[in-house]
Structure formats: structure tokens, C-alpha cells
Amino acid sequence: MAVLWEVPADPPEPFTPLTFTWAFQPTAQALETVAIDIVLTDQRFEWELLERPDDGIEIAVPEGTVATAAIAGQLERIRELIAPTGRDIPAMKLALFDSARGSNACTENPELQSVVLADRLPCRITDADRIYDRTGWIRLTASHLSGTVAQDVISDYVMQRVFAEAFEAETTPQWFKVGVAQYFSSVGKAQALVSVRDAFRTRRLLPSLATAPDDPAREALWRDQSFGWVVYMTDQIGRDGLLAIFDSMADGATLEEAWEAASGGQTLAAIEAGWRAWIFTPQAEIAYSAPPFGPPTPTVRPSRTYTHTPTPTETFTPSPTPTDTLTPTVTLTYTPTTASGYAPPTRAPSLTPSDTPTATATPRPAELFEAPSEAEAESSTAALVMVGLVAAAVVLLIAITLILRRR
């Protein structure tokens, strides 16, 4: 016996147990009942469920894609991040789908109608989607749903729910929404910096981010530039400053007004020029790789605080003092003789005064007082040394000559 259960207009929640009670009454016997519990699930995947009743949060993910414990940890990091704003994560029911994985039992023929693949009726996609929609479940789809991708998808959705007024406002530019979504992701950041640097060098940066280009390559660059602007803004005002912008926009301010208030008067128009010069700095590499959650990454900036840096000073190291060594020298005494054998008398001092010029106080010209240059001083020293050597040589030559003559 087969019974086809039609989805009612007010369907039950997905991933919840249903109790079917069967009543049997054989002929001339009492009525008998049999209860069967079945979990209402989406047959396209095997599912893992994260349930947090106190927070009103339920998240279903395909089995083998991401651990529910990792999702719970991500939610806690988001809660810590937004706590200074006085906001909290709202109640939500999310079902994540992997578009790159084939489903178990739900397929469609070319007419987009469900077809039977087994000896039972498979799920009908339209019926499954109707159950999600009518019970308040949000379907989020991503390709190749790994653990990192799943956390990024959830983070983006949660942040847009927390600051819904900011992201849903018509005055919020699309580049800001896209940039913020990528900022709260954890993949592709380093490559985005490489992309915009290369585009800058080859003069391919987009002059405006007002609208996304239709060309896929230019659209990818537009996303990288949008993300870069948000990273630059965050580097200038800090992550708390970025959250303050969200908060101001949620209260009705435009992005222009919120940015000027958070940045101390800077305009959105000035972001592009500042960002172009900033992307080639070491600080940009730090900011692009900074995690969106957890402790903020410190910003490396020059400090105005005086720091004493000792400068090298010349240190005099005395060399060993030479010791005078008494070396005996031969002193030659020449005593002239005459035929009489007497030495000639020495010249007696004269009492006649000599004509000695008197010193005058006539000042010398100023140029005579100029200190000699280093080269001139060295030259003068060398000349004196040379004169001394020549004089010593002459004395030695005379002494040798006298010795030879005495022999």
C-alpha cells in the first residue's frame, strides 16, 4: 500500500519530525493503531543541522561540507564583532545548497518537471521550495560549498541582516555592498591586491565604480577595486570605525555623511586617490590579509613620540706609550791644532750692543690669521719632516768625513 502525502497549504517545518498514525480495523475486530515518526527532510542532500533554540537560529548544511561546530564558532565571532554597536544576531533559519553537487533524488527533465528515479516518488523541487518559503527558511546557494565558503556565505548574510537598513537603502552604492561582502569573507584577498596592482601598472583601473561593467573581466576588476576601497577605508578608520559607518547608515545617514563623520571630514571622492597611492605600501599588504573577525590587526604608522636613538661617538683608545730607550751615541769632538800646539782662543763676548730691531704692535692683515686647510697643514708637516731629515743627513755626513780625516 502506498500513500502519497500532499504538501498542505500550511506545511510543517523542514527538518522536523512528523508523526503518522495508521489505524487498522480488521473485520469484526477492534481498531488498532500504529504510529510512525518520519523527519521531513529535503531529499536532495543528506543534511547536518545546527540548532540554537535560545537564539532562534537553525542552519542546515549538506553533510560533508562544513562542520556545524565551525559555523557556531563563526556566529560567536560575529556576535563579538558587533557587540560595541549594541546589536545582536537576529533569529534566522538558513539552508545552504551546493550548486556544484548533484542531488540524490531530485532531478528535472528538459521541461523542468520532476522525474522518478526510484520505486518511490522523489521530491518535487517546486514543492520543496514552497515548504522553505512558507516556513521562513532562507535558501543560500554557493558553488563548491567548502567549510570556508560556507562560513563566508553565512557571514555576509548575517552582517546584511544585522545592518539591514544600511544595505537596503537606495542611496547605498553597489560597490560598497560588494566590497563589504568580500571584506567579511576569508578567501581571495591577497589575489585581489595583486590584481589591482597589476591593473594600476598597466593603466587598466576603472575610473568609476558607480556601476558594475558587463564584461566579465572588467566586472571581476570592479569587484577587486570595490573590495580594495573598503579595505582602505577600514585601514584609515579601523574596524570599529567601519561598524560605526554601518550604524550611522542604519540610522538614516548616507554613506557620504557617515564616512565624513568617521574619517574626520574626508570625502568619498578622495578615497580613490588615497587608495591608489596606498596599495603599494607594506601597510596595504597587512590590511589585505587581516582577518575580518577576531582581534584587530595593528596599523603600522609613524609615531610622533620622541624616541632617543643613541648615535655613535668617537672613542679614544690610547695606544701603548712608547718608552724612551737610552741608546749610546758617539759624540765627535774636534779640537783644532796649530803648529805651536795651542788651541786658538775662543771669541770673547763683546760689550758692544748689537742693533736689534724693536718689536712693533702693527696688526697683521686678517688673511694672515686664516687657519690653514687640512691639505695645507699636511703639506707643511711633510715639508718640516723633509727639512729635518736633510739636516740630519748633512750632520751625519760631516761627522763621517771628520772621522776619516783623523785616520
Image: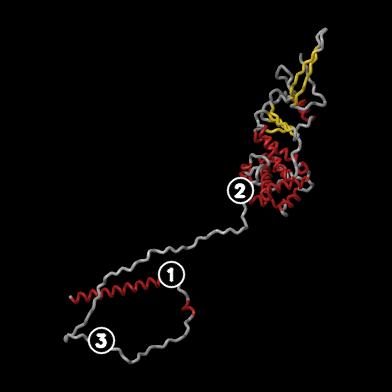
Quadrant including the N terminus: top right
- Callout 2, which amino acid? Arg
Residue ID for mark 2: 201
Is residue 12 or residue 5 the one in the foreground?
12
Residue ID for mark 3: 346
- Which of marks 2 and 3 precedes in the sequence? 2
Is residue 327 or residue 249 the one in the foreground?
327
- Which of marks 1 and 2 precedes in the sequence? 2
- Callout 1, which amino acid? Ala
The residue mark sitting in front, 3 or 2, is 3
- Callout 3, which amino acid? Thr
- Within 10 Å of disc 2 (Cα), the crowding (few <14, some 14-19, many 20+) is few
How far is disc 3 from disc 2 in space, using C-alphas? 99 Å
Residue 213 in view in this figure: no
The residue mark sitting in front, 3 or 1, is 3
Residue ID for mark 1: 375
In percent of the image, x 71 and y 33: which residue is there? 141
Contact (CB < 8 A) between labels 3 and 2? no
Q: Quadrant of residue 57?
A: top right
Q: Is residue 350 above or below residue 240?
A: below
Contact (CB < 8 A) between labels 3 and 1? no
Q: Quadrant of residue 189?
A: top right
- Which of marks 1 and 3 precedes in the sequence? 3
Residue 163 in view in this figure: yes
Of helix, strand and loop, which one carries label 1?
A: helix
Residue 146's x, y, as percent? 65, 33
The residue mark sitting in front, 2 or 1, is 1
Side (left or right) of 343 relative to 236: left
Residue 322's x, y, as percent? 35, 66
